[in-house]
Amino acid sequence: MNQSATPLAWDDFRLIKAIAEKRALPAAAAALGVNHSTVFRRLGQIEEALGVRLFERHRSGYVATPTGEEMVQLAGRVDDDITAFARKLAGQEIKPAGELRVATNDSLLVDLLTPLFAQFLRQCPDIRLDVLIGNQAANLSKRDADVAIRATDNPPETLIGRKPARIAWALYGRAADFSDAALPGVESLWERSWISLGEQFTMLSAVRYLARHVAPERVVYKLNTVLGLAEAVEAGIGVSFLPCFIGDTRPGLTRLAPPDPDLSADLWLLTHPDLRHTPRVRLFLDFLAVEVAKLRPLIEGELPIGRNPPPKEPIAEAGA
């Protein structure tokens, strides 16, 4: 090692870790928010200072040498320690203020949470919400988000939280296609056209149930978002299982069968243990627990079976 070289800094470890994870300098540069040339130049300087190669350059990308792998592992441990320290500092906040990152999915946001978030911001003007949408679980241990709002029966064991409601699912069709007072049984609908979520949603009981009972050729339309299911049913593409808080608020839909308890999933409000006493996190979770509980009849499908109310009879706003 060049004894006169500048000592390695934490940013150097982050750079080596990013190259190892991305296996390409442009991708590592993008992850770090710097130029490709900066990563290339600094990697050369680090290797020169250490007197060893940290990566082998293959056609498949950059592969860490044994020394490089040691540096990557050390960077990972330091990164975990820094993140844990940041969480503990966040947990020592005195005033409920600042940014709060909330991870959820599009259907929960659009059909359930947005009015609640608006109400929360009116009550807590010193807090800013940064909402992250996606069906993949956010890594709260890495502070990807402070709070996650998810529909699941198996929340990560590393997180803590509350389940203020259980999301009911039922079968829905376009109201115009089912105008008779007597609604059909589910078994009589197997030969109709069906709409389903894609294979990446097999963790949902409704998707597995449909796959067991409906012939593949009858599933004429698949999506990778729950939000699009209701629109597809309203458009007359087919029938589908929907969360009741979505299906029961759309006048163009009619519920064709009672909610099936086997298709339900818990609604969880989750955070990391180190953040549970953070004022803004605690305030947000307390608020949501109360407001979501008020909406339990809708979320748990307690409305009467059949056609939904016409537009002139809107569902009351949350918290009203």
Image (cartoon, rainbow, N blue to C red):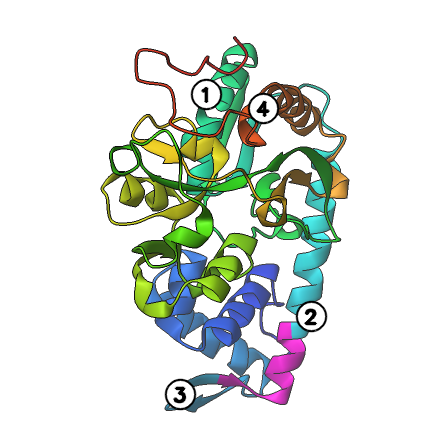
122 relative to 109, above or below: above
Corner quadrant of residue 80:
bottom right
In the image, 300 versus 174, the foreground residue is 174
| Quarter of the image with the N terminus in it | bottom right
Mark 3 nearby-residue class (10 Å; few <14, some 14–19, many ≥20) = few
Query: On the rendered structure, is 163 left or right of 185?
Result: right
Residue 97 among magenta residues: no
Query: On the rendered structure, is 255 left or right of 260?
Result: left
From the viewer's perspective, is the residue at label 3 or at label 1 nearer?
A: 1
State which region is magenta.
63-72
* Residue 146 place in picture, x, y as percent: 61, 39
Q: Which mark is residue 74?
A: 2
In the image, 187 versus 95, the foreground residue is 187
Q: In this orientation, does residue 12 appear?
A: yes
View extreme (top): residue: 320
From the viewer's perspective, is the residue at label 2 or at label 1 nearer?
A: 1
What residue sits 56% from the left and 55% below the top?
Answer: 205
The residue singled out by tag 3 in the image is 60
Q: Mark 2 to mark 1: distance in Å?
A: 44 Å
Q: Which mark is residue 297?
A: 4
Task: Look at label 2 and name its amino acid.
Answer: Leu
Instruction: Choose the circle earlier in sequence order: 2 or 1.
Output: 2
The residue singled out by tag 1 in the image is 115
Q: Which mark is residue 90?
A: none
Give yes or no for contact between labels 3 and 2 (Cβ–Cβ under 8 Å). no
